[in-house]
Every structure is written in structure tokens, then in C-alpha cells.
Amino acid sequence: MNRSEQLFGRAKKVLPGGVNSPVRFYEPYPFFATSARGSKLTTADHKTYLDYCMGYGAMVLGHGYSSVIEAVRSQLDNGTLFCVPTEREIKLAEMICKVVPCAEMARLLNTGSEATMHAIRLARAFTKRKCVIKFEGGYHGAHDYVLAKAGSGAASMPASEGVLEEASAQTAVVPYNDPAALERAIEKNRDTACVIIEPVLANIGLVLPEKRYLNEVRRITEQNDVVLIFDEVVTGFRLQLGGASEFFGIKPDLAAFAKALGNGLPIAAIAGKREIMSKLAPAGAAYQASTFAGNSVSVAAAIATLETLIEAKNAIYPKIARTCDSIVDGIKDALSAAQLDCTVNSIGSMFQLFFTGEKVKDEASAKKSNAAIFRRLFDELLKRDVFIPPSQFETCFVSYAHSEDDADKTIEAYSEAFRRIKK
Ligand code: PLP
């Protein structure tokens, strides 16, 4: 029995399912990690994998990025949690407001779920309306109003037990990339407070917005006075410094950030229009609070991350995109050599494969991918020291730390995996 198997046996006794987040489990047991550096993860069995999970997108600069680690280290000597304001929280909020197109104010929080949950409450407080519209396959965290037809780990489950029907009844779900469906849903439900959307779906595999789709979403929400929330938990500071909003040139009313903001430390933010943000307590009457919000360690990590991303944005974003493009080109060549039916979606530093001959443009087409082949791909890649997220309904992430040599090894691993799958 190897060390990961032993550890999983122990874990199952004290952690439900042996893990602290469902997406980390796969059959028969997940490998256990001991350390990570750059583009690589090391396991309890002393194996080293090229990592394309990258903290589900959080590690935009790579694992253990020196300036971030240095900032955390020096902060530790000065205290970790004050629960009174600090100047560095202002600095971070100022940086967010400088780089995020819709951000006139920001509130710091800890996780993506918290950010989307409070963004929705804020939209309700601002509009005095109740309903939320989300998209099929869109994932916004694990709270009650957004679990309907959600992506990520929830994509492979029936509706979660414990979520009240009364809560789910306030959420309408429409297909992505279908502006007419959104228009109909808003017409039907005049009590809509907000539309929450991942500008690029990254939790049902990777699904891109069709040309002008996001412009249409903006037009429809604006015309109906509905708050548009961009869930940029994945795309924020990753697709571009100013996230999907900058990439596609569209300003939502509110946006939620987490993941890449702290390059591996837990931190999140809501940002947006002053008139809406001012509704947050204590300025306004929409309540939000958190002991750990703006804690000095996460703030130090986020300032160091943003300083690096701002300073070197002309080098970082093109480099990550180039590395991702070369991996995707290599994978496409290998797929045609192996004559496998597969659609590859990619944008910026993200990519995912779907084993279907059809174009993947929404949840319904994503779910046509052959899950058994995807699972074989995961296993074959792991045997070749490449770790991708175990689920079809996730996205592969390239970081600034991934080198050309990593890309070549990755293409080789995919090519061999395809040959094994084809046999
Ligand atoms: N929104 C999106 C788009 C996400 O991908 C995730 C997590 O994967 C979340 C929200 C929830 O973030 P967290 O897991 O930090 O609560």
C-alpha cells in the first residue's frame, strides 16, 4: 500500500469522504500532496507532477512565488490578525479600484463563495427585488441561492440536500450563450434583482462566450435595471489584469474576485459601483461581516501578487497565453494524429478537452463529452506525471511558472495518453 492510500484510509475516519472539498476526491483515492513549487506538486509518495489544477486557478504566478512568500513571511513577524483597520487594506482596495474597470469601491472578504453570496445580497438591497438569474453550468460557490444547475463538483450531483425549496424558488436558471433566453427570463420575472454570470464558464469544463454575447447580457440587464454581477473568481487577474471585464471590454455593476487575487492565500473581494457598494454596512443597511476579512497575511499576499501583476503585466499575460496556446496546439495535433473526436476550448491561460465531435458552447453540449474517456485521460496523464483536475467539469490552468519545457512534456504526455486511449 502506498503512502497516499494509507493516508486516505486515515482521512476517511475523520474527514467526511476523506477530503475537505468534494472535487478533491476521485476513485479509488486521491494522491496526497506534501509541497509545491513553480509549476509542480510533490506527493507523499515522492512523486512530482506537472500541475494544471493550480489551486483551481488561484496560482496565477505559480506555486511559492518568491515575492508573495516574502511578503507573507515578513508580515508574520508583525502579526496576523488585528480586527481593526490597517493602512494596507486601503492600499489593496486602491489597487483593485485602479485595475478593475467597474471598481469604484471594494470590500475585502475571504472566499469566492462569500463574495458571490454578499454580491447577491447587495443587489437585492439595492434593487429591493428578490430573484437571482444564473446560468446552467455556472458555479458561484456552495451557498443556497446559486446551487441550482451548478457546475464544478455540483455538476455530478443531484440538487444538494439541505437547500430549502423556498431558497431555490428565488433562482431562475437559463442557458449560457442564449441572449433571448435571458431576455425571456427577465420579462417573466419582474422581481429580478440580479443576473450573476461567470463571463467565461470555467466550472463545466471551459465554455467561452460567443461573439457579443456578453455585450447582449449587459444590454439586457441595463435596459431592465437589473444588477449585473460578473463572477470573476476564476477570470479575475488571470484572463487579464482587469479580468474578463477588461478582456471583453464590458463593465458589470458588481464583480466578485478571489483565487488569483492572493496567489494561494485565502482572500476575496466584491468591487463595483459606488452607489451599490455604499449599501454595505456600516455605510448602508446590507449586512456583511467577517472576522478574517482583510487579515494582514492575506492582504500582504494580495498586495505582492497585484504589484507583480501590475509591474510585469506586459510580460506575464502574453507569456502565460503563449504557453497555453502552444500546449493547446500540440494537443490538437496529437488529437488529429490519434483520430479522436474531441473539442478543445481555450482562452488566455485556460483550456479543457471535451470528448465530443460537437462544438461545446453551453452546459448541454459540455455534458455530451464522453466521461469515461475523460477519466482514462486523467489516469493516463497521471501515469505520465501530469496532474489535471480529475473532473471533466473543471478547467486546466497554466501559470506564469510553466515553462516551454513543461509545455513540451505536457504535449508528449497528452500524445501518449491519446495513443493508449485509442488502443
Ligand atoms: N465562483 C467561481 C467562478 C468559482 O470557480 C468558485 C470556486 O471554484 C467560486 C465562485 C467559489 O469560490 P470559493 O471556493 O473560494 O468559495
Image: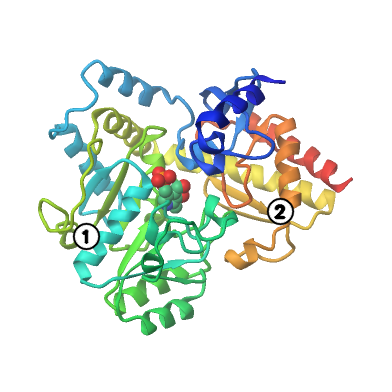
Q: Considering depth in this image, is 118 or 421 the residue closer to the camera?
A: 118
Q: Residue at the front extreme?
A: 13
Residue 92 position in % (x across, y down): 23, 38
Please state if 410 lies on the left or on the right of 224 as rendered. Answer: right
Q: Residue at the top extreme?
A: 77
Q: Is mark 1 on a helix, strand or loop?
A: loop
Q: Considering depth in this image, is 318 or 154 the residue closer to the camera?
A: 154
Q: Which amino acid does label 1 sit on?
A: Lys
How far apart in space, not on screen, are marks 2 and 1 (Cα)?
41 Å
Q: Considering depth in this image, is 401 or 57 the residue closer to the camera?
A: 57
Mark number displayed over residue 273: 1
Q: Residue at the right extreme?
A: 423
Within 8 Å of ligand 1, the CB of disc 2? no
Q: Label 2, on which residue?
A: 371
When asked about the image quadrant of residue 66, the answer is top left
Residue 25 position in % (x across, y down): 59, 39
Mark 1 burial class by Cα count in 10 Å: few <14, some 14-19, many 20+: some
Q: What residue type is labelled 2?
A: Ala
Please report the residue visible at 32 percent of the width from the left and 48 percent of the height from the top.
114
Q: Choose the circle earlier in sequence order: 2 or 1.
A: 1
Say if mark 2 contacts mark 1, CB within 8 Å. Answer: no
Residue 115 position in % (x across, y down): 32, 50
Residue 235: in sight, yes or no?
A: no
When asked about the image quadrant of residue 167, the answer is bottom left
Name the quadrant of the N terminus. Answer: top right
When asked about the image quadrant of residue 293, the answer is top left
Q: Residue at the left extreme?
A: 283
User: Which of label 2 and label 1 is nearer to you?
Assistant: 2
Judge whether 19 appears above or below 253 on screen.
above
